Amino acid sequence: MQENIITVAIVEDDREIRQLMTMIIDGSPGYSCKQSFNDCESAIPEIEKKPPDVVLMDIDLPGISGIEGVRKLRNKLPDTDFIMLTIKEDDDSVFQSICAGATGYLVKDTPPVMLLQSIKDVHEGGSPMTASIARRVVSSFKTTSESPITARETEILKKLCDGENYRTIAEALFISGETVRQHIKNIYRKLHVNSRAAAVQKAIRDRLV
């Protein structure tokens, strides 16, 4: 009985890297790579027409970035998994990739055997990452220790993020509505925002809660 073939698409603007990965993947038993592109503009419509099981996506692409490419495809292809393949290991790239919907994140010099295993792992529900990248992802989801707001203000900001109003916040924290208003005024001032929506957006973006 023939084993299930994992179909893979590659979006990578470096021709040599793209060809090498295509050769490795397509030449390995259990894998097929018939889609390769040098940018998201050409990749997105083709991948939408014929979705692969896994997409290897470079972050630094001309035009639409790999992160934006994943975001666009993820919404339309819930059954496709995305692995970011790049030379970057900085926190911001990792965090944006995961938020966009990437499941795995590997550096470009990942050995062929590990690359193939990672494709298999992500297809089977795993999240392949190098150890150094995994540590960055874990730390990026921790509340920052350099928050400009106090512990009480953080508590109130979290409740704002949860959609609670002044009255329910006051009741939950056993303080007056006026005290809640004063705390929120201080939060706005410290975060340099002037609306609840902006405060919530900044709290999530900067991982303050």
Image (tube, rainbow, N blue to C red):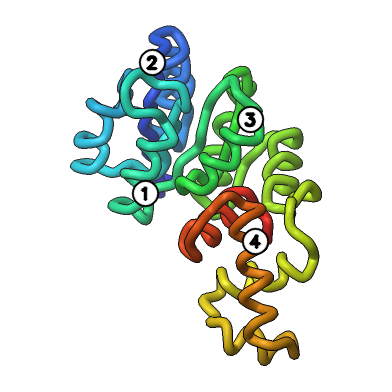
Sequence-wise, the earlier of marks 1 and 3 is 1
Q: From what the image shows, is residue 92 above or below residue 195?
A: above
Q: CA distance from mark 2 to mark 3?
A: 22 Å
Q: Secondary structure at mark 3?
A: helix
Task: Look at the numbered disc 2 and give the secondary structure of its residue.
Answer: loop
Q: Earlier in the sequence, mark 2 or mark 4?
A: 2
Amino acid type for the residue under numbered disc 2 = Asp
Q: Earlier in the sequence, mark 2 or mark 1?
A: 2
Residue density around tag 1, few if under 14, some if 14–19, many if 20 or more, within 10 Å: some
State the residue at coordinates (49%, 44%): 102
Q: Which mark is residue 114?
A: 3
User: x, y (%) of residue 85?
Assistant: 52, 28
Q: Which residue corresponds to mark 4?
A: 187
CA distance separating discs 1 and 4: 34 Å
Q: Secondary structure at mark 1?
A: helix
Give the total of numbered labels: 4
Amino acid found under the numbered disc labelled 1: Arg
Image coordinates of residue 114 in percent, x first then y, are 63, 30
Where residue 13 is drawn, which disc sits there?
2
Q: Give the amino acid type for the residue marked by disc 4 in the picture.
A: Ile
**Residue 120 to residue 199: above or below:** above
- SS at mark 4 in the image: helix
* Residue at the spot of label 1: 74
Residue drawn where x is 80% and y is 66% of the image: 151
